[in-house]
Image: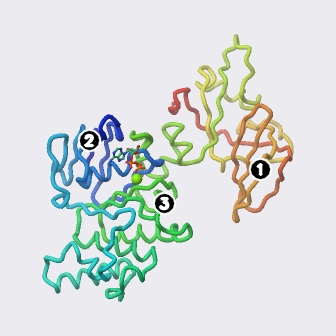
Amino acid sequence: MLSLHNVSIRYGDFSAVQDFSLSLEIGEIACLLGPSGSGKTSLLRCIAGFETPSQGSIELRGQLVANCQNSVAPEKRGVAVVFQDYALFPHLNVKDNVVFGIRHLPKSVQLERCQQLLALVGLDGTESRFIQSLSGGQQQRVAIARALATEPDILLLDEPFSNLDAELRSSLAVQLRSILKQAGVTALMVTHDQSEAFTVCDTVALMEQGKLQQHGSPESLYQSPANLFVARFVGQFNVLPVASMDPSSQSKPAVDSGLKSRLVQDEITQKGGIMAFSPHAISLSSSMVNGSVDSVSFEMTIKSMVFRGGFTEYTLGDLEGRALRCVLSGSPDWHQGEQVVATICRKAILSFGDDGYRLK
Ligand code: ADP
Ligand code: MG
């Protein structure tokens, strides 16, 4: 449905997106995920036709719609956009907002499509309501119905939850996925929020500073991060440098003996490098259990703890300044200042080179 080939976007001398490639299948819901300023909105605007790529090309349904010389007008692309602020018409009622893009069609067609779409987004019977009388979540769904009314080939959504209360967001994210799947529409959503991306989308393209870092299913990004940026952003992984185990080196290894023995077999020990593991991969105990070949242990102190309801987040630290984040289910069993042994299953440890890319 959509292919981006080596797209770069410039604003004067500033390079906002570099060499970005991505393809979307028909019916796929994909996400551009990344921190603020990583170039997500620029790419969305380029696909919609509001910006022109400085390099590369964009195809919709196999037809070239943009390169640095040619650009098909936004209204001729078969693309609909749900903007961050929804951009609804406050002086029009719900029905007139929804049918705005199809007001050239016969009244009976307009009315029928409006009723179908309001039913799809769970707003039946609100045709004559005015926009200001609706909640933020309802306004968002009117904006989605309005975008779908033109029967676009692809729906683009920019930070669709940014104007909503935190508690509404997670339930609306589930609803949005179900609405898009029922409509069978191909969609590309932009967000900086990893949990929204994972809830709504089939695939996620993670960006940093205008570059694609990894594209794949939420599970593949979480379980097999290509580099440390992905591991940190998607899994909030703990990251610890491992000193080189070169025997001539006098420097103290940055990891405890249990880990050292395992790492002897690993490439990481010859070169030095970085290991990373999820905060969920750590278990805590009060004393060192006899070194298991399957796990690695560190003696640490509880620096802080936050009870989050169903789980507790701990920050652990040691005298060498290493810090670990650990998440355990249930209420706090450990308290600030207590000495603990943090144990990590070896299978859960991923190895990265000094360049930040995954070893293997
Ligand atoms: P995101 O949506 O990921 O937050 P944007 O695509 O909005 O990122 O912006 C990417 C970078 O491009 C930012 O550094 C931003 O300041 C810059 N930028 C965006 N739009 C313009 C513009 N019209 N002119 C100049 N710089 C821009
Ligand atoms: Mg943006």
Q: Label 2 sits on what residue type?
A: His
Q: Position of residue 53 (x, y in %)?
A: 25, 42
Indicate the secondary structure of the residue bearing disc 3.
helix
- Residue at horizontal 70 percent and vertical 39 percent from the top: 294
Q: From the image, state whether disc 2 or disc 1 is nearer to you.
A: 1
- Residue at horizontal 52 percent and vertical 39 percent from the top: 229
Residue that numbered label 3 is attached to: 196
Q: Are marks 1 and 3 in contact (CB under 8 Å)?
A: no
Q: Position of residue 115 (x, y in %)?
A: 28, 84
Q: Position of residue 250 (x, y in %)?
A: 74, 14
Quadrant location, the N terminus? bottom left
Closer to the N terminus: mark 3 or mark 2? 2
**Structural crowding at the residue carrying mark 1, measured as other residues with C-alpha within 10 Å and reported as few (<14), some (14–19) or many (≥20):** some
Disc number at residue 5? 2
Report the Cα–Cα distance between label 1 and label 3: 28 Å
Q: Position of residue 306 (x, y in %)?
A: 73, 57
- Residue at horizontal 17 percent and vertical 77 percent from the top: 103
Closer to the N terminus: mark 1 or mark 3? 3
Disc number at residue 253? none
Q: Is residue 57 above or below residue 124?
A: above
